[in-house]
């Protein structure tokens, strides 16, 4: 089921018209989809950060509880050693126990220091969590607003887009794969996203290079695909110039001074 040249050209023009409409819809949405994506990433980052802070809090609390337990152990040992000191046989034993008591007291001091440090860390983590949550809820508001905007814009064009998508599929089927690929390539390379254009006022509608009359005749004949020699765009039609000339250019002379 091969398409004839006029059919192919017809399909290409349709394809271009559809794609230009879709471009326009996307343009209206502007940077919104990207902004929404960026905000979502940013928010995910805050959530991960707060999760990490919370894990840090758990670890610090665990550390405090461990230190408290070891302090209790040290206290018990001190008590035990002091009791033993009442039953020593000589000074050497007494002194040895005193050393043990000193050692455990030192352990307690170290633990107290560590607990204090951990408590300070907990306080600063809590501040960081609060700050991050603050930023997060601000950004969440931004995200909600942008999502709403996008939703409104999308719903406005939803029907049209669905129709364009169907029309596009139909048009694509009528274009040979190789040609379709070059169409896509042309479009992605062109700043105005036009791959199929008409000759307008004897010039290529894409790059405005002059199209010689003989080529214009060939384009009109539709016996083969003709591309612009300058930009490579497919020249599908030659727009009638009459329309432009129809406009009354002359202003009534009488009114002129
Ligand atoms: Zn051109």
Image (spheres, rainbow, N blue to C red):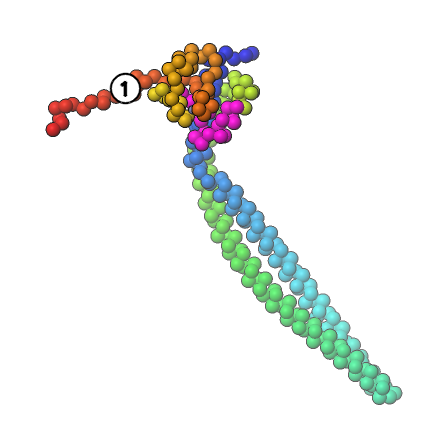
Camera-nearest residue between 95 and 155 = 95
Q: Quadrant of residue 218?
A: top left
Q: Quadrant of residue 91?
A: bottom right
Camera-nearest residue between 1 and 227 = 227
* Crowding at mark 1 (Cα within 10 Å: few <14, some 14-19, many 20+): few
Q: Residue at x 66, y 73 (%)?
A: 113
On the image, the x and y values in percent for residue 138 come to 48, 52
Q: Is residue 180 visible?
A: yes
- Image quarter for ligand 1: top left
Q: Quadrant of residue 220?
A: top left
On the image, the x and y values in percent for residue 59 come to 67, 61
Q: Is mark 1 within 8 Å of ligand 1?
A: no
Q: Is residue 79 visible?
A: no
The answer to if 201 sits in the magenta stretch is: no
Q: Is residue 40 above or below residue 108?
A: above
Q: Residue at x 54, y 12 (%)?
A: 2
Q: Residue at x 64, y 57 (%)?
A: 55
The answer to if 197 sits in the magenta stretch is: yes
Helix or strand or loop: what does disc 1 sit on? helix
Image quarter (top left, top right, bottom left or bottom right) of the C terminus: top left
Q: Is residue 121 above or below residue 245?
A: below
Q: Is residue 239 above or below residue 151?
A: above
**Side (left or right) of 251 relative to 165:** left
Task: Name the residue beneath numbered marker 1.
Answer: 245
Q: Which residues are magenta?
A: 182-198
**Side (left or right) of 169 relative to 105:** left
């Amino acid at each position: 089921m091969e398409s004839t040249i006029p059919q192919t050209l017809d399909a290409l023009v349709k394809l271009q018209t559809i794609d230009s409409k879709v471009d326009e819809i996307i343009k209206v949405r502007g940077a919104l989809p990207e902004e929404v994506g960026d905000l979502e990433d940013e928010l995910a980052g805050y959530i991960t950060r707060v999760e990490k802070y919370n894990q840090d809090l758990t670890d610090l609390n665990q550390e405090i509880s461990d230190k408290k337990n070891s302090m209790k152990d040290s206290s018990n040992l001190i008590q035990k050693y002091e009791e033993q000191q009442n039953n020593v046989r000589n000074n050497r034993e007494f002194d040895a126990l005193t050393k043990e008591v000193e050692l455990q007291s030192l352990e307690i001091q170290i633990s107290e220091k560590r607990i204090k440090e951990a408590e300070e860390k907990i306080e600063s983590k809590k501040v960081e969590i609060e700050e991050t949550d603050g930023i997060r809820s601000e950004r969440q508001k931004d995200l909600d607003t942008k999502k709403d905007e996008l939703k409104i814009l999308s719903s406005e064009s939803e029907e049209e887009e669905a129709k364009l998508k169907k029309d596009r599929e139909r048009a694509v089927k009528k274009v040979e794969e190789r040609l379709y690929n070059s169409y896509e390539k042309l479009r992605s390379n062109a700043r105005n996203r036009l791959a199929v254009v008409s000759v307008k006022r004897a010039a290529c509608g894409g790059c405005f290079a002059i199209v010689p009359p003989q080529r214009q005749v060939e384009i009109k004949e539709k016996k083969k695909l003709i591309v612009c020699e300058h930009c490579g765009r497919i020249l599908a039609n030659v727009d009638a110039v009459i329309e432009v000339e129809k406009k009354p250019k002359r202003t009534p002379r009488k009114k002129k001074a």
